[in-house]
Every structure is written in C-alpha cells, then in structure tokens.
Amino acid sequence: MAVFAGQDAACCDCAPERKGMICFQNAGKFILKNIELYIPKGVAVGVIGASGAGKTTLLKLVSGLLESDVGIVRTMGKNPARERRLLSTCLRAYFAEHFYFQEEETPRCQFHLMEVLYPGDRKMFWEEYKMLERQFCFSEYVDKPVKHLSLGQRRRVELAAVLLGEAGLYLFDEAVNGMDEQGKHVFWKQLQRKKESGATILISSHNMEEIRQVCDRIILLDQGRVLYYGDRDGLIRRFAPIGQIEIQFEGRLPDMEDIPLVWYHIQQDLLRLAYNTNHISAAEIIQRILGQTHIVRMNVMKQNLSDVIAAASAERRNDE
C-alpha cells in the first residue's frame, strides 16, 4: 500500500509521477486486500461501507496508528507509522472510538494546553477558538470535567479541538456519531471551510447522504475491497440509479404515460413512482406533474447505503 498527501512526489518512493496525492497501492492489513487508490491533494473524500468493511483500518493506516503488512504507506511523503512525529503538525486525526481529551480535565484547560503547542499567532488561536465555541455552542459546559459531559457534548468540544488551527490533511472516522442535527450541521459547515482553504479531507461514515454534503469523491468499501472510487454522482449513476417519489395530489388525475418511468401506481389521491436518474431527474418529473395537477405533499426517496453496497457487490460477483 502507498499513501501520499500534501507534498510533491519527490518525497515519495512508490509513484514518483503522481504529485501531491494520497495513494494506496497493493494494500494489505487485517480485512483490507489489495487496495489501490490515488487521491489528489485538496479534495474531500468520503469513505463509506457497512460495519466491518475496513473504513477505520484504512484511516488508521493513513494516520500511522497501524502499519500495513504488505506494500508501502506514505502520507505527505513520509511513512506515517514510523514518522508520526514529523507528521504531527500537518495531520489531524479524529477516531470516534478514541477519546481526544483527558477525562478528569475540563475542555477549557485542555484548550489552554493546546495553545502552548500552537505554532501560530496566539491571538489568532483564541479568535478561532471563540468562533468554534460559538458555532458548536459549548460555552455552558467548557468548564466541566470531560467525564461529566454527554457523548454529544464531548463530540462538540473534541471536534472543535481537531478543527482549531490549520493542517494539510484531516482524517475523521465516524465523527458525528452521537451528535444532534445542529451539531452535525456545524461540523459539516466547518469541514467545508477547511476544504475551501485547500486542505485534504478523508472522512468515513455509515451515512451516504451526510458524506455527499462535502465530499467530491467517494470510496465504497465492502469486506476489505474497494468496490468504487470516483465522484459522488457517478456512484449513484452506477449503483443506485433508481429513485422513488411519493406524491399526494389534489384535482385532476395526472397522466404518466409520456414520462419515462420504471413503474408508477395511483391509488385515489396518492401517486407512487420509480424512475431511473440516468434518464430523468426528480425535478423534471415534478415539473411535469405540476403542469397537470396540484401537489399537496411530496416525498423524494433515494437509495440508501445498503442498496448501493448490494448493487456493487452483485456487480463484483458478476465480474469474477
């Protein structure tokens, strides 16, 4: 396996022609098998898959918490498992299974410790801290010992600590587990800010829709193998093109015969339909129906992660 991020390939010994990338080549560790990926610098990549697919192992190999059994690992031009100290100033990692702050201390105390190690201007440190404190709304419990915080509260202060300052590469493993919707919204907003500043982001999740908010590319893992790596819309076009819409209408019965649908069913004032997103969009369908009748209520349903994994797995079996 090889992993590169944030530096030119002159630092890297497995793919010198590829510059400024994260790269996995012929990877092998635990469940992961023969992983080959090349991720450009400055993009946000989502890693999705069912539990046990290898998402956490993948991120731990990039961060250096694990060392690959075979192949090469390079992160920002260095061996992360053996040169973690050299990477510490330009790589930030958050794993939901590990607590970031000490149990007995307060978050405020630990932010003060971070200030001592902060390489930049102290004024900028506290200005950004205040912004994150306000956005994540943790001022009411920043002086409580961490052990007395709820899981959601703990997530907020820990993620603020990871996001505080600048880094070239950010890794997040199931970061929003245990957070409420408001906290999730703030996290994705802050992640977008980091992306716009030029950082490379690698984030894993079970939730495909959340990942799609920020990520340019998607890695789909299943049983330790990469089933897909590419842009987010391509994933849907390839593995989950069928969408469904449920519409409650009032007035004239809509004529569906001229709309390219997979199927449709009308029962009294309720219309259910399925469509192929490669052939027609939900917006086009809704526009045509609006031209015929009045829509009272509407629900656009998309394929979930399990549907995508099932389709990708079936395609892999057919290819083998």
Image (cartoon, rainbow, N blue to C red):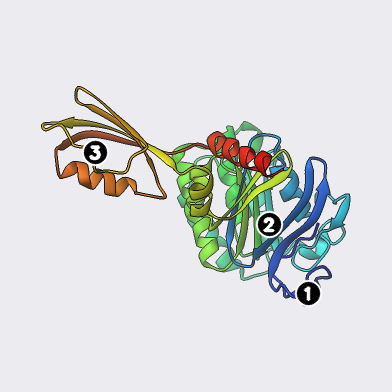
Q: Nearer the viewer, mark 1 or mark 3?
A: 3
Q: Which residue position holds label 1?
A: 16
The Cα atoms of the two marked residues, 2 and 3, are separated by 54 Å
Element on which disc 2 rests: strand
The reply to whether residue 192 is in sight is yes
What residue is rendered at 70% in x and 74% in y? 19
Q: Quadrant of the N terminus?
A: bottom right
- In the rendered structure, the answer to whether residue 131 lies left or right of residue 320 reads left
Element on which disc 3 rests: loop
Which amino acid does the dot numbered 1 rest on?
A: Pro
- In the rendered structure, the answer to whether residue 186 lies left or right of residue 97 reads left
Q: Is residue 74 above or below residue 176?
A: below
Which amino acid does the dot numbered 2 rest on?
A: Arg
Which mark is on residue 92? 2
Going by the picture, which residue comes out furthest to the left? 251
| Residue 76 location (% of width, % of height) | 74, 67
Q: Which residue position holds label 3?
A: 257
The reply to whether residue 145 is in sight is no
| Residue 181 location (% of width, % of height) | 45, 39
Image quadrant where residue 267 sits: top left
Element on which disc 1 rests: loop
| Residue 191 location (% of width, % of height) | 53, 56
Q: Nearer the viewer, mark 1 or mark 2?
A: 1
Quick one: 281 or 72, which is closer to the camera? 281
| Residue 199 location (% of width, % of height) | 60, 65
- In the rendered structure, the answer to whether residue 13 lies left or right of residue 301 reads right
